[in-house]
Image (tube, helix red, strand yellow):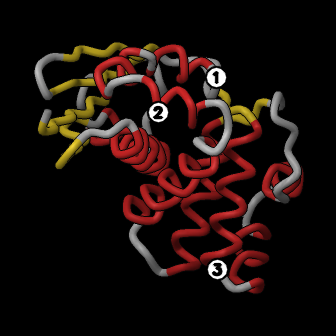
Amino acid sequence: MKEVNLKGTPINGLVEFVMKELTPQQYQDALARLPADHQKYFTGHVLAHELVPVSIVNTFTEYAAEAKKESLKSFARRAGRYGAEIGLKTVYKFVLLVLSIDSVLKKAPLMWTRVYDGGVISVESGDGTAGITVTEFPSHPAVCGRITGWFEVIGERAGAKDMRLVHDSCAAEGAKACHWKFVWRK
């Protein structure tokens, strides 16, 4: 599978989250575990258009979760939520105000290409339910957690009432693809 890259803005959001969660020493210790040529990506100053391999971002997320002494899935999910909150302060804020949850979820493939340069995302949406499947993507608990956090915030901000989101199939755990199931009250 080809390497998939993540654009700079979400990485800066991850760094901001990590710096709030960890002590300065814990942050420095997590950063120091990375090879020297990878540390530059986690200063909070990556340009929006820069591409960083998802595998490097996953490793940094792992090291930060270990420093925090929190499970990787939980830490990554919270990091994803934090990143989504930052991202939704821009143009997407207005998109979520005018579109229904169904419409927002159907826009997920377009939003995906604004963040990742690979992977295939498909959306099936119906009456108070939706499913998002991601294939051709290097799944890992760190990236799946971050994506789950993003999806949670997007659903909440798009007005889904009593939304439940489950990452019910994960390629990092042996499934053929990653799948998230959304259920909400209309």
Is residue 4 something that shows in the picture?
no
- 172 or 142: nearer the viewer: 142
Mark toward the viewer: 2 or 3: 2
User: What whole-number distance in Å separates the C-alpha atoms at marks 1 and 3?
Assistant: 28 Å
What element does badge 2 sit on? helix
Which quadrant holds residue 56?
Answer: top right
**Residue type, mark 2 in image:** Leu
- 100 or 120: nearer the viewer: 100
User: What whole-number distance in Å separates the C-alpha atoms at marks 1 and 2?
Assistant: 19 Å
What element does badge 3 sit on? loop
Left or right of 16 in this view: 72: left
Which residue in the protein does label 3 denote? 22
Q: Residue at x 76, y 38 (%)?
A: 8
Left or right of 66 in this view: 127: left
Mark toward the viewer: 1 or 2: 2
Q: Reply above or below: 94 against 149.
A: above
Q: Reply above or below: 45 against 52.
A: below
Q: Which mark is residue 42?
A: none
Q: Reply above or below: 14 against 105.
A: below
Count the numbered circles shown: 3
Determine whether label 1 and label 3 are within 8 Å by CB: no
Q: Residue 171: x, y in percent?
A: 32, 33
Mark toward the viewer: 1 or 3: 1
Which residue in the protein does label 2 denote? 97
Q: Which is nearer the N-term, disc 1 or disc 2?
A: 2
Q: Which mark is residue 114?
A: 1
**Residue type, mark 3 in image:** Leu
Sort mark 2 into few (<14), some (14-19) or many (20+) by Cα contacts within 10 Å. few
What element does badge 1 sit on? loop
